[in-house]
Amino acid sequence: NAGVTQTPKFQVLKTGQSMTLQCAQDMNHEYMSWYRQDPGMGLRLIHYSVGAGITDQGEVPNGYNVSRSTTEDFPLRLLSAAPSQTSVYFCASRSGGADSTDTQYFGPGTRLTVL
Amino acid sequence: AQSVTQLGSHVSVSEGALVLLRCNYSSSVPPYLFWYVQYPNQGLQLLLKYTSAATLVKGINGFEAEFKKSETSFHLTKPSAHMSDAAEYFCALYGQNFVFGPGTRLSVLP
């Protein structure tokens, strides 16, 4: 049981480049989410999904796209990277629907630098 | 609107001393509250959570937190700090989604 996995661990992009951050979980969790972590600001929700085929925006969705074609995978896409997107990105998953307070499990993070 | 504030971005304690990390929240509905710990270069790990049962919640590694509705607080405590407690701690509130506080970095001095 690997839990929540994220790839890559580190990435450097140039402004305007695109890339996809991968996230997978093997716990059959319905709810998955993406956060970005910036110094002094805690974690901020980018996008979330309550199940395959269902996604919604969080607090800071601009510049990011997501899709959820399977229960296991929830990739985050940056279509045109900007320096403001330099951050550490965390994927998380938990069981239950939108109203669940079940424990959220976090991946190890992806450290992204946009030059 | 929901929000979480954590007083003190950095707290230092001596090994063996009491740990007190402060969290206050604002919520228009009865909140669910959480404390997470993040060790360097790792993801977040749940320490404990309050989901409207007992107001004093015990978590892992000897930590506990008390929900005080009148003070809108959910402070985290540990009677005796250990070197391994050095990490960043996040308080979080759950409404429709999770809202995290800015974090408090705990240093433990020998």
Image (cartoon, coloured by chain):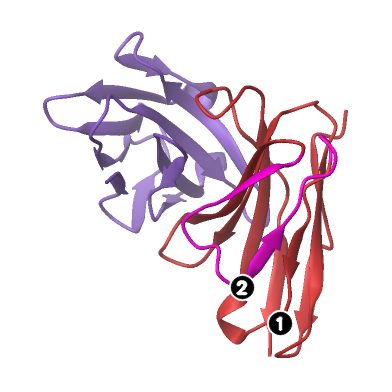
Chain colours: A red, B purple
For the residues bearing labels 2 and 1, Cβ distance under 8 angstroms? yes
Residue with the mark numbered 1: A80
Q: Secondary structure at mark 1?
A: loop
> Cα distance, mark 2 to mark 1?
7 Å
Q: Residue at x 51, y 30 (%)?
A: B47
A100 or B79: nearer the eye? A100
Q: Residues within 10 Å of mark 2 (few under 14, many from 20)?
A: some
Q: Are marks 2 and 1 on the same chain?
A: yes
Residue B50 in view in this figure: yes
Instruction: In the rendered structure, find residue A63 and report the number of the disc placed on it.
Output: 2
Q: Secondary structure at mark 2?
A: loop
Does the magenta-highlighted stretch encompass residue A3? no
Q: Residue at x 81, y 73 (%)?
A: A19
The chain carrying label 1 is A
| Residue bounds of the magenta highlight | A53-72
Marker count (numbered): 2
Please determine whether, in this image, residue B34 is positioned above or below residue A115.
above
Q: Measuring from the top left, give residue A72's x and y in whole percent.
A: 84, 37
Please determine whether, in this image, residue B26 is positioned above or below residue B76.
below
Q: Name the amino acid, label 1.
A: Ser
Q: Name the amino acid, label 2.
A: Gly
- As drawn, is A20 to the left or to the right of B91? right
Please determine whether, in this image, residue A60 is positioned above or below residue B32.
below
Q: Measuring from the top left, give residue B74's x and y in whole percent.
A: 29, 31
A37 or A81: nearer the eye? A81
A41 or B103: nearer the eye? A41
Q: Earlier in the sequence, mark 2 or mark 1?
A: 2
